[in-house]
Amino acid sequence: MLVILDDMEGRRAFRDPQAVITAATPAQLPAALAALEAALAAGCHVAGWLAYELGYALEPRLIPLLPQEGMSLLSLGVFDEPVAGLPPPSGRGWA
């Protein structure tokens, strides 16, 4: 997993996570959120992505609207310090 952030602090990258926190179903979210809180409390950095559909999974009455299979609701790496001073991205597609 590689996460690159471009913001007011400059370009930083997070790579080689200690762990990856994932949840593919609403039932997996409590454990994933607890792991996220534990990683942050331990002083780690957490970076990755949250699916738009995660909002549906957090609201019980919207859970029936979630796609049934084939997607992840969140994928977050647990990292030590970010790496700074990376070169600009090559190619045309980055977000």
Image: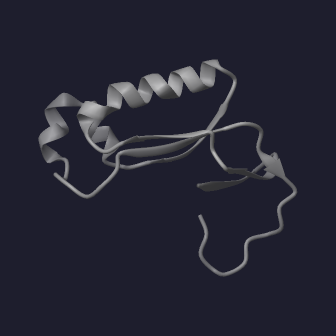
Whole-percent x, y for residue 36 in the image: 51, 28
Whole-percent x, y for residue 47 in the image: 60, 43
Whole-percent x, y for residue 74 in the image: 41, 44
In this view, which residue lies farthest toward the bottom?
91
Residue sitting at 24 percent across and 32 percent down? 27
61 vs 64: above or below:
above
Q: Is residue 21 left or right of residue 91?
A: left
In this view, which residue lies farthest toward the right?
85
Q: Nearer the viewer, residue 1 or 37?
A: 1
The total number of labels drawn is 0
Q: Nearer the viewer, residue 59 or 90?
A: 90
Q: Nearer the viewer, residue 68 or 19?
A: 19
Q: Is residue 62 left or right of residue 7?
A: left
Q: Is residue 69 left or right of residue 54?
A: left
Whole-percent x, y for residue 83 in the image: 80, 49
Q: Is residue 49 left or right of residue 9?
A: left
Q: Nearer the viewer, residue 48 or 18?
A: 18
In this view, which residue lies farthest toward the left?
64
10 vs 43: above or below:
below
Work out which quarter of the rendered image holds the N terminus and state it: bottom right
Residue sitting at 12 percent across and 42 percent down? 64
Residue sitting at 26 percent across and 41 percent down? 25
Residue sitting at 33 percent across and 42 percent down? 54
Work out which quarter of the rendered image holds the C terminus and state it: bottom right
What is the basis of the colouring in this image?
A: one colour
27 vs 47: above or below:
above
